[in-house]
Amino acid sequence: MPDPRLLVVEDDADLRSLLTRGLREEGFDVTAVADGASALARAEDGPDLLVIDIGLPDADGRDVCQALRARGATAPVLFLTARDALTDRLAGFNAGGDDYLTKPFHLDELVVRLRALLRRSGADPRTIVGSLHLDPVAHAAASGDQEVSLTPTEFRLLAALVARPDAAVRRRDLVRAAWPEGAIVHENTLDQYVARLRRKLRELDSDTEIVTVHGVGYRIG
Ligand code: CA
């Protein structure tokens, strides 16, 4: 299970190394840079989320965010700001930011907010395969800007496949994951649900598909 990839853009060297160390300990795969130009270069790697200081030496963090959005980056952005003026906050959101934190802050609070952003964006790697991502809050599957809603059983079934991308998941494990304990699930019920999920994935134009693994079960990839 890969750690979420986080790009930190902070020119204060002490804070940058503190964030790098602290967030690595919290299970983030951290890359840290000190200015807007480096941020734009490193953002090509497609991080899962970004922390951007608004006061950077070569640019305003909000402009960096806007430039990333203009290039099609959709990863959530949390701004760090030394200022606490309401206008600054609003300008941050207008620039495509998803959350902000005013310095000084506690690392714990940053971690909680980052995890919430990952959950909201569906960018938690445990919920993504290829272009497909699951939104556990909305009980939906999405690809690009398209989204289909799933029944609770469909969602659990898809989540069980997505949790182990490219692995053949046994039929009985899928039944156990998707239906309540003790439920009587007929042999072809699982196949009917998989057929429905395949139809829904096709509606999304996703490049991710559910493949039959004969004698075993199904895999997603
Ligand atoms: Ca700064």
Image (cartoon, helix red, strand yellow):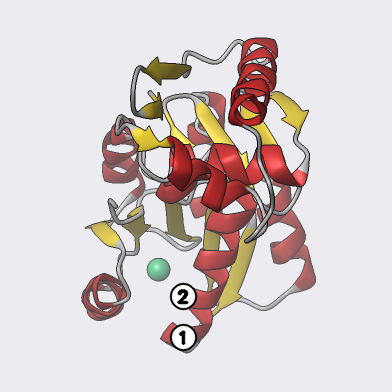
At label 1, the amino acid type is Asp
Residue carrying label 2: 111
At label 2, the amino acid type is Val
Q: How many marks?
A: 2
In the rendered structure, the answer to whether residue 157 lies left or right of residue 163 reads right
- For the C terminus, the image quarter is top left
- Tell which quarter ligand 1 is in: bottom left
Residue carrying label 1: 108
In the rendered structure, the answer to whether residue 162 lies left or right of residue 31 reads right
For the residue labelled by badge 2, is the local secondary structure a helix, a strand or a loop?
A: helix
Q: Position of residue 62 (x, y in %)?
A: 56, 49
For the residue pair 212 and 122, the one nearer the viewer reads as: 212
Q: Position of residue 4 (x, y in %)?
A: 36, 54
For the residue pair 51 and 152, the one nearer the viewer reads as: 152
For the residue labelled by badge 1, is the local secondary structure a helix, a strand or a loop?
A: helix
Camera sees residue 214: yes
In the rendered structure, the answer to whether residue 86 lies left or right of residue 211 reads right
Q: Position of residue 166 (x, y in %)?
A: 30, 29
Q: For the point 50% across and 42% down, which residue is it?
A: 174
Distance Cα–Cα, label 1 vs label 2: 5 Å
In the rendered structure, the answer to whether residue 50 lies left or right of residue 157 reads left
Q: Position of residue 3 (x, y in %)?
A: 30, 56
Whether label 1 touches label 2, CB < 8 Å:
yes
Vertical comparison of 155 with 4: above or below: above
Q: Which mark is residue 88?
A: none
Vertical comparison of 105 with 153: above or below: below
Residue 186 quadrant: top right
